[in-house]
Image (cartoon, grey):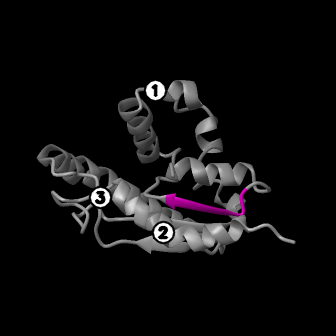
């Protein structure tokens, strides 16, 4: 999970990871939109500090930890990327798995989850374009709907599992 960091971990440790799956992540972290996304996750949702993580905007750590910029480091790694559009999908309903009958949770998922997912969808398409430009193959699941929520990632995990499991098998 953590769509950004899983890609950067695979770039930083190519001998450790043979496959990586990013569900609704934003791989581009050093441009203004990417920095805003990282801040929203780290500072707003996680109540942390990006200054402690990568320093001020001018710090080279922002670029050093940007999977989009450093995508060539994914060459030879099996890659699965997925995202929805942010439009309500089959799990965005009152009886959905992340809603549990709560109208408040449904509204949050439909508003906040939709906004986040529309941003990560843009980021995921940009990452596809970057990988394509580098000639790095990947498997993509671009859903025509779906918000930023666990039910969709569970489906993505099931969809990506054969690739991940195959990469985890040890050679004789």
- Residue 11 placement (x, y as % from top left): 69, 53
Circle 2 Cα neighbour tier, 10 Å, few/some/many (<14 / 14–19 / ≥20): few
Check disc 3 and report its element: helix, strand or loop: loop
Q: In this view, does 39 lie above or below 11?
A: above
Q: Earlier in the sequence, mark 3 or mark 2?
A: 3
Question: Viewer-nearest of labels 3 and 2?
Answer: 2
Span shown in magenta: 17-22
Q: Tag on residue 48?
A: 1
Q: Quarter of the image containing the C terminus?
A: bottom right
Q: Per the image, is 81 magenta?
A: no
| Magenta segment main secondary structure | strand
Circle 1 Cα neighbour tier, 10 Å, few/some/many (<14 / 14–19 / ≥20): some
Task: Name the residue nearer the viewer: 116 or 64.
Answer: 116
> Is there a contact, CB below 8 Å, between mark 1 and mark 2?
no
Which residue does the numbered mark 2 point to in the structure image? 158
Question: Viewer-nearest of labels 1 and 2?
Answer: 2
Check disc 1 and report its element: helix, strand or loop: loop
Task: Name the residue nearer the viewer: 109 or 44.
Answer: 109
In the image, taking residue 145 as reference, residue 64 lies left or right, namely right
Which residue does the numbered mark 3 point to in the structure image? 147
In the image, taking residue 119 as reference, residue 68 lies left or right, namely right
Q: Which of marks 1 and 3 is nearer the N terminus?
A: 1
For residue 159, say whether it is visible: yes
Q: Residue at x 20, y 54 (%)?
A: 110
**C-alpha span from label 3 to label 2:** 17 Å
**C-alpha span from label 1 to label 3:** 24 Å
């Amino acid at each position: 999970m953590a769509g950004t960091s899983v890609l950067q971990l695979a770039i930083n440790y190519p001998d450790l990871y043979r496959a990586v799956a990013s569900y609704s992540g934003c791989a581009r972290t050093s441009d203004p939109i990417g920095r805003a996304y990282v801040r929203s996750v780290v500072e707003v949702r996680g109540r942390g500090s990006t200054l402690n993580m990568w320093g001020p905007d001018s710090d080279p750590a922002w670029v050093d930890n940007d999977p989009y910029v450093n995508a060539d480091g994914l060459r030879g790694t099996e890659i699965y990327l997925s995202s929805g559009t942010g439009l309500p999908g089959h799990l965005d309903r009152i009886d959905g798995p992340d809603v549990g009958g709560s109208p408040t949770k449904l509204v949050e998922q439909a508003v906040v989850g939709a906004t986040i997912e529309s941003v990560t969808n843009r980021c995921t398409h940009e990452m596809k374009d970057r990988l394509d430009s580098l000639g790095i193959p990947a498997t993509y699941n671009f859903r025509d709907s779906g918000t930023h929520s666990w039910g969709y990632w569970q489906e993505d995990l099931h969809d990506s599992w054969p690739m991940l499991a195959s990469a985890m098998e040890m050679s004789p």
